[in-house]
Amino acid sequence: MGRMTRHRIEIGLALAITLAAFLFVALAVWAEERTSIAVSEAWVRPTIGEGRVTAAYMTIQNIGTDTDVLRSASSPKAARVEIHETKMTDEGVMKMRPVENGLTVDRGGAVSMKPGGLHIMIMGLDEKLPEGATLPLTLDFAKAGKVQLTVPVATRPAGASKDATGDHSHH
Ligand SMILES: [Cu+2]
């Protein structure tokens, strides 16, 4: 009798594991289908002194089937988040301004945000951002919807050494 019970438990357990495996695969496929945006090498600069302003950089890849537009960004830790572009004016002065009508990421393409160029401007932070901390950031795309990120606070991208040897963003 005791042996029978154990056997049943084992069968039950095997079924549960199988079911869990099926669910896991189903969820993974579901997530796969919905993912059309891949963000890599995201980093945000530490704040300086009592400053509560900083900028975040990253590479946004569109691995979906349609062109998408990054419409806005937000963070629960910041009052305002804007998509900015730094450009040299005719007078030779570096100036940054908000990107009008969102940032287009072509199908199969990538947009690289780097110091001196495109960046995500973070204003009105709740607190200092020391190196080693993280910042929650949400990107809102026209097609892909909201993409949640946890961005490490650092003075350079985590995969910085990769940039020196080659560039994976060209296609
Ligand atoms: Cu800016």
Image (tube, rainbow, N blue to C red):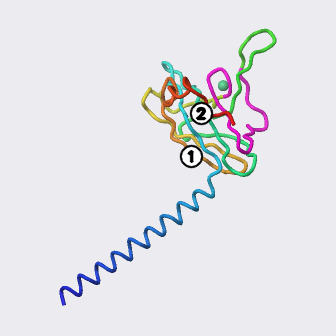
Q: Which amino acid does label 1 sit on?
A: Gln
Confirm or deny contact between disc 2 and disc 1 (CB under 8 A): no
Residue found at the very far bottom of the displayed protein = 1
| Picture mark count | 2
The answer to whether 135 appears left or right of 98 in the picture is left
Question: Which circle's residue, 2 or 1, is located before the other in the chain?
Answer: 2
Q: In which quarter of the image is residue 99?
A: top right
| Residue located beneath label 2 in the image | 58
Q: Which mark is residue 79?
A: none
Quarter of the rendered structure image containing ligand 1: top right
Q: Quadrant of the N terminus?
A: bottom left
Q: In which quarter of the image is residue 84?
A: top right
Which residue does the image show at 41% across and 72% down from the upper left? 18
Q: Give the range drawn in magenta.
A: 96-118
Give the vertical position of 49 relative to 150 (above or below): above
Q: Where is residue 164 in the image (x, y as percent from the top left)?
A: 55, 23
Observer-nearest of 45 and 113? 113
Residue found at the very far top of the displayed protein = 91
Give the vertical position of 19 relative to 147 (above or below): below
| Residue located beneath label 1 in the image | 148
Give the vertical position of 79 relative to 52 (above or below): below
The answer to whether 117 appears left or right of 161 in the picture is right
Observer-nearest of 48 and 56? 56
Badge 1 marks a residue whose secondary structure is strand
Observer-nearest of 92 and 34? 34
